[in-house]
Amino acid sequence: MSSQPSQAVQEETRSADGPIVNDFGITFCTVNGSGSATANNTVLRALFKMGIPISGKNIFPSNIQGLPTWYTIRVNKDGFLARIEKDDIVVAMNPATFARDMEYLVPGGVLFYADDIKLPITRSDIVCYPMPVKRLIKEAEVPTSLRDYVANMVYVGVVAQMLGIEMDAIYAALDFHFKGKKTPIESNFSVIRAAAEWARANLTKQDRYSVERMNATEGYILTDGNTAAALGALYGGVQFVAWYPITPASSLAESINEYLPKLRTDPISGKTTCVVVQAEDELAAAGMTIGAGYAGLRAMTSTSGPGLSLMAEYLGLAYFAEVPMVLWDVQRVGPSTGLPTRTAQGDLTFAYFVGHGDKNYIILLPASANECFEFGWKAFDLAERMQMPVIVLSDLDLGMNQWMTRPFQYPDTPMDRGKVLWEEDLEKFLAEKGQWGRYLDVDGDGIPYRTLPGNRHPRSAYFARGTGHDEFARYSEDPEVWERNMARLKRKYDTAKQYVPKPIIDDANHAEIGIIAFGSNDPAVEEARVYLAQRGVQTDYLRLRALPLTDEVEAFIRSHDRVYVVENNRDGQLAQLLTVNLPELGAKFRKANHGDGMPLSARWVRDTILSLEEK
Amino acid sequence: MTTQEKVNAVGMTRADYRGLPSTLCQGCGHNSIANQIIAACYELDIVPENVVKFSGIGCSSKSPTYFLSRSFGFNGLHGRMPSLALGALFADITLKGMGVSGDGDTASIGMGQFKHLMRRNLPMLYIVENNGVYGLTKGQFSATAEKGLKLKREGVNLYRPVDICKEALVSNASFVARSFAGDPKQVKELIKAGLRHKGLAVLDIISPCVTFNNQDTSLHSYAWGKEHEVRLHDIAFLPVPPRDEITVEDFEEGTVRSVELHDGSIIQLKKLEADYDPTDRWHALRALEDAELNNYMVTGLIYVDPDAPSMFDLYDLPEQPLNRMTESQLRPPRETLEAVNKMMF
């Protein structure tokens, strides 16, 4: 990352005039269901194709058609891709939000608007470009039924012309979107070209913004976290997926369905090696997953907060009966139905404590699409090694938005199927140890050996249950047996520390201040650290990737005077968990948390830390 | 001199199918059912390791430990046994699933999962040990308790009961049967037929609770059951190939109807009612409706569709059990990832 200032502090640091190249935010303000996603993705992909770092964020309503929706692309030559709070450029297609959308513009910003919106322009410090959308569409000879959908292509053409987005790059984006189908590619492209032509002939460039080809996206791919997680799971050998539709997690399971035939068809039999079931609800989705995990399949489910609430009961059973399973929670804003189409990191404490009684879970915290892929396969190794649920906490911002990310890397370790005894293994085990018990800890790591249904050895069977049981899976209400089993489970959870992904630590600054964050806040934190350094505030940074906490986390906290815990929720849930786990270090934590449904911005992180530093 | 204990065709003695001693009440209908499960599996020459038992929560759901100790089992959550069984049985589709549930577990808390299991036609035997009462929590009404039933601490039941067989029929279950725990021979024959059915076999067994709900006037009591049971037919199950021990001599020619199951085994029904046709769903519903109107209980094979595609038929599964597959079969080869990365733009 370069240390040049960037968008989050645009209005403070920019010179009053001169061109602004490859460094701005543009928001497309449209109506949900109008087909604007295609147009917006076309712009995003074209910029990426031009080698310019970008991120795209869809701020959409819980609605199928008719409510306002916004799509913000951040263009940043330095590779800062966190959300920015103000717009440099607004493309106003929705009269309902026109006045407010305009307010988000920075001074000197640009307003493109459909000229059929007959509303007053209330800003005198911006540049305005009206676009004759209706006229251009009429001229484009498009079937009436498609007019609304291609209308958005008019703004693609006008914006491309005024900012300098290359037509070849736009064509490549359309070609990708329509999977090479000539008819839709050409009909959309002809509208774009005509609109660009109109803009060239009729608009005079008055603003400062433009794009120029770079070479900064080579070695990156463009994808979303849900697709990445699905692919990771497929490379992790997932064999059973049960799910129930919920925003923002649905596209995870749907992506598994999409890529399953390509990646997981057995070359000899022609059969697929993974079963996907859409369950009747999340209770059943969890139950099916746990059934499959119990019987030896790599099993997963994907959901969001409300679904996790319903799965609480089954997660407790999986913990106690020691069943491996993977659960992806693509977080949205809770409590309750909350904001179904907005992002948050509000399920952390719930995931950590989910279910009644004493229990623990492994939690993975991916921060990039690439890491969604990595944890997509790794989660199964962990679940099967530890014989317990692994909950992966993604979020809407990471899961549903497009990110440029490093290409997916092939798993660098063989599959870890854990301690499983098939017929011959059991025979050998019995010969060596004299006895086998499903919950008997023979290795001292708390992890027992399991057999799987289908094992035909006459001594392989056991009766799994959520009720009290002894080392041999026999029902027991004996206080000593109960406590011994619970102590072993705790020991097992301690063992998990050896296996979970370690945090990523940057302590090169040897600063007094440490920052701890996780998940999709990473870009905002990295960017904020640059601005803080410019203000003379040096920071170190630990990005947490898993729970239970490994020793590195405690060491990091101990070696810093004060530790800012940055997170996207109301209560500072990670700060709470750190305090619970490391109570003697509690005084060091400073909560830097906030939740309004939007991804955190670098400016907010910087300003929050600065203001707390002043106290 | 020791007498050699009798073994079946797979070399198992009856003892190989036993479980732990029951901890249910003396005289509980569920114990009788457990014994018939043991007998049915023994007589069908089932290898115990080929069965997986499932249950929910309640007295009935405790019973899977009282039979087939050599089979895997999972006693899961209240009302959530169907989903657990569904996931597990996909791991090795050569295994036989056997679920034991109760009326609370199936018709109250578990109604949703029960209905969806039927919709999917997962191959397994689903036994409901139906006593109209919650036993483990000391005698509350269940959803199958009849309206007007009086229980000691609960007073009078205000609501109409759920009829599990009717629910099964309207959910397109492919095998619906009802029996009475006091009629062990019929119970056993229906268990056998259910185990051989290639889809979901729902077997609702009225199983009186001797402690909390065995008043002579209650329809979940021994006395009422014995007095009001009307068999649709006498039933005999003939596995394939037919074996000598099963006698069919009491089935008179001309009054016997045979239903062939998918694996070639045959259920023989000696007709008591002249024109009862268990492959006609409308007929089946009518029989249940008539029974309710006239205050009797029909038992026997109420409905069967031997050819309904099972859930496994709907998935294109490999022959090798999924849970025996190893890394080389499950992890796509390295070279595929390059193509995947290219697909991402």
Image (cartoon, rainbow, N blue to C red):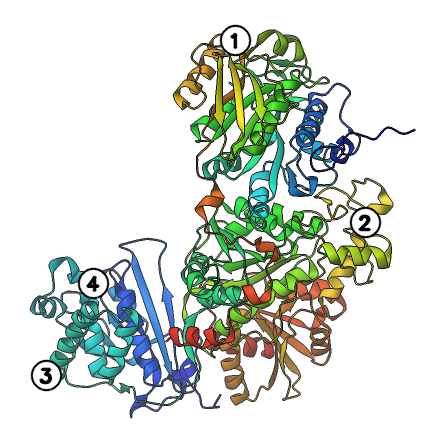
Kindly indicate whether the residue at mark 1 contacts the one at mark 2 (C-beta within 8 angstroms): no
**Mark 4 or mark 3: whose residue is earlier in sequence:** 4
Closer to the camera, A67 or B306?
B306
Q: Residue B86's x, y, as percent? A: 55, 44
The residue where tag 2 is placed is A471
The tag on residue A201 is 3
Closer to the camera, A347 or A504?
A504
Amino acid on which the number 4 mark rests in the picture: Tyr
The tag on residue B295 is 1
**Mark 4 or mark 2: whose residue is earlier in sequence:** 4
Amino acid on which the number 3 mark rests in the picture: Ala
Closer to the camera, A126 or A528?
A528
Kindly indicate whether the residue at mark 3 contacts the one at mark 4 (C-beta within 8 angstroms): no
- Real-space Cα separation, disc 4 to disc 2, in angstroms: 64 Å
The reply to whether residue A113 is visible in this rendering is: no
- Real-space Cα separation, disc 4 to disc 3, in angstroms: 24 Å
Q: Residue at x 57, y 67 (%)?
A: B328
Task: Classify A537 as above or below B78.
Answer: below
Q: Residue at x 69, y 31 (%)?
A: B42
- Mark 4 Cα shell of 10 Å, populated few (<14), some (14-19), many (≥20): some
Q: Report the label total.
A: 4
Amino acid on which the number 1 mark rests in the picture: Asn
Label 3 secondary element: helix
Q: Residue A274's x, y, as percent? A: 51, 57
